[in-house]
Structures are given as C-alpha cells and as structure tokens.
Image (spheres, grey):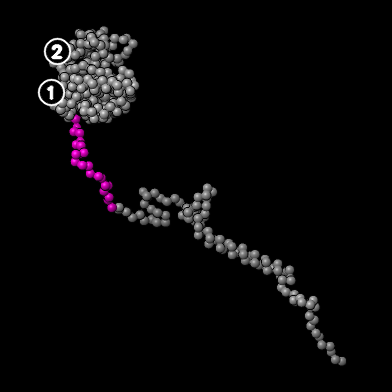
Amino acid sequence: MAQKKSVKKTPKTNKGEQPASFWDSPTKVIGLCAAFLILSLTSGMLIGSFLDDEGPEESDNGVAIQPAEMPQNNVAVQPYPTYEEGLIPDLKEPLPEIKLPKVEPEVAALPPEEVKPAKPPVMSKQDGPAWERFAAPTESLEGRPAIAIVIDDVGINKSRVADLANLPGAITLAFLPYATGLQESVDLTRSKGHEAMVHMPMEPTRESANPGPDALLTSLSLEEIAERTRKNLSQFDGYVGLNNHMGSKFTAYREGMQVVMDIAAEKGLLFLDSRTTAQSTGYELAKERGMLTGNRDVFIDNKAEEAAILVQLGKVEEMARKNGTAIAIGHPYKQTIAALQKWVPEAQRKGFVLVPITAALKSN
C-alpha cells in the first residue's frame, strides 16, 4: 500500500498581509528591551566616569570649583603651602629663587631754584647765656616785619605739642613744669626749629583759679619761693627762658619777683612778661638785671573761636607793621591750632617773618 507524502503546512494569511515577524512576539520584544537597558546603564556609568574629569563642578553658592580644589580618589586635597615653606604639592624640592631685575623709580628732577636745603639740626652753643645757647636759628629779617607766636600751657597734651611743632615758621612753646615727659616734647619742639620756655606757675588774683602744683605764692617765704623756682626750672633742659603762668597777684609782688629774677639772671635766662596785670614788676626787674626781656602785645585766643582768633592775628599783623615786631600769646586749643595752620602760610606770603622769642626780644 502506497504511503502518503507529508506536506508542510503554511499558515494562512489574509490577502495583502505579510508573514508574522519578530516584533509580533511579545516575549522577544521584552527580552530585547531588557538587554538594551542593561547595555545603556553600563555605558552611562563608563561615560560619566570620563566626564567627571573634564570640567569644573559648581558649589552651592554658584561659584565654580576648580579641579585643583576637588578631591582626588576620595582623599581631601591639602591646601598649598605658603611661599615660606618653599614647596608645592607632590614635590619635595624647594621652589627655585626668582630674581627680578631692579627697577629704579622714575623721579622728576626739581628745577634748581625749587630745591630747598635741608634744615640744619639744632645745635646748642657751648658758651654764653642759656637764651643764646638754646636759641633757634632764624632767617634774616631784611627790613620785613617780625611776629613771635608764643603758645602757653603746653605739655599736658602730647598730640597738641606735635601739631604745634609741625607748624611752618619758628614759634615758641612755653611748657608747664608739672607736665610729664617734658624732655621728649622739648626735644621734638627744638628739632623742628622752634624754641622752648618754662611756663612758671604763679598765683592769680582770682582765688578760684588754680595755677597748679609748686606755684609761686605771695604767702610763701622768700626761701620757699626760691626753692620752688629752682625746682620748676629743673624739670627739663634746652629752654631759653620763662614767662608767667597766671600770676596776676604774684607778678605784682615785688619782693617775690626779685627772688625769681635773681635766679633767672644767674642761669642766663630771658623773661617774657605775659602782662596778666598792669601792676606786674617782671619786665622792670629783668631790665635792671640786664636780662633779655619784653612784654606780650596781643592775646589771640581769649575767645576760643577760629574766626575770632583770625581777627586777633590781624591785629598782630597791624602791630608788626607799625613797630617792626609784635609778640602774641595763645594757647594749645584746637581752634588756635586750626587758625594758625591757615594763618601762618598766608602771613608769610604777605611778607611777615615768624621768629622765635629770642629774635623778637633782641630786635626790640
């Protein structure tokens, strides 16, 4: 009996349809997607590891962090050593010394006529009276009017001493003998071309006014007056003379003033009478002893206002034009210093010469 020949059956399809493909099998599609996802994750990690080294990250405050500041291999980067340590990271050799060429700064040369010679140091003479040995140098008057500015009550405030010492032109500072650190202040004053005096405390007429410790009083014996005078004159060195601090009562006391003038003449000092009273005997007694002496002409700061002080300085100018010399007394008020800082250059421009007290008294 003949056997039947087997025939492979082909699935039937509708007319125009293609045979079933790979994508018609859900199982195959899911497997392919899973494989692709695993491959993507693996590739992303590999690519990310390369990208981490290619650019700066950004910190929380929006400032880019440079690669040198970022951790390497999870180890915190140590800060760079200072230049004094001489090393850089990963190197143990010192940094090579870099020598820069020396560049001289360009300085415009002043015309010869504008170059001012340095002020010579203050030199004390080896002999002669004290007022001459410790006198400050002064320029020739050549017929010009001279003004001596004397500032009383100096020494308590050191910063005011420095401000006064830095004024242009020669002035004279009268130091209270009971202030501290006087020698340093006097040395500074003289180094700037100014003169120093002792501002001798003396008894005023008004009982409520206090002249300070070791003041000369009419109630003291003549021996006590001499003792206090010598003590006050020994508090510092380098001064040319003295003037009275207050003293409207004591300067009228002839016997007491005779003791003071005898000691001052013995030491070769000058005496400037502040003229706190018309009854003062100081100028007359100093003249009798052949001392360099004179009287104050104008108080410039009875009213401690800058505008008022400038008005008084105008009066000083008028007196200097009339008499050839004028002596003004002021105090170390802020307003006085401010007025002098403005007035001194202007007075010099007008032709006045600021002189120390020695030069003013010699010209009288």
Q: Is residue 134 visible?
A: no
State how far apart marks 2 and 1 are (Cα). 19 Å
Label number found at residue 128: 1
Q: Quadrant of the C terminus?
A: top left
* Magenta range: 101-122
Name the residue rendered at 50%, 52% in the picture. 64
Residue at the extreme bottom of the image, as rendered: 1
Q: What amino acid is found at the position of numbered circle 2 in the picture?
A: Glu
Give coordinates of residue 354: x percent, y percent.
22, 26
Q: Quadrant of the N terminus?
A: bottom right
Q: Are marks 2 and 1 in contact (CB under 8 Å)?
A: no
Name the residue rendered at 23%, 25% in the picture. 171
Give coordinates of residue 295: x percent, y percent.
21, 16
Name the residue rendered at 22%, 11% in the picture. 280
Residue picked out by circle 2: 288
Q: Is residue 289 visible?
A: yes
Res 206 quadrant in image: top left
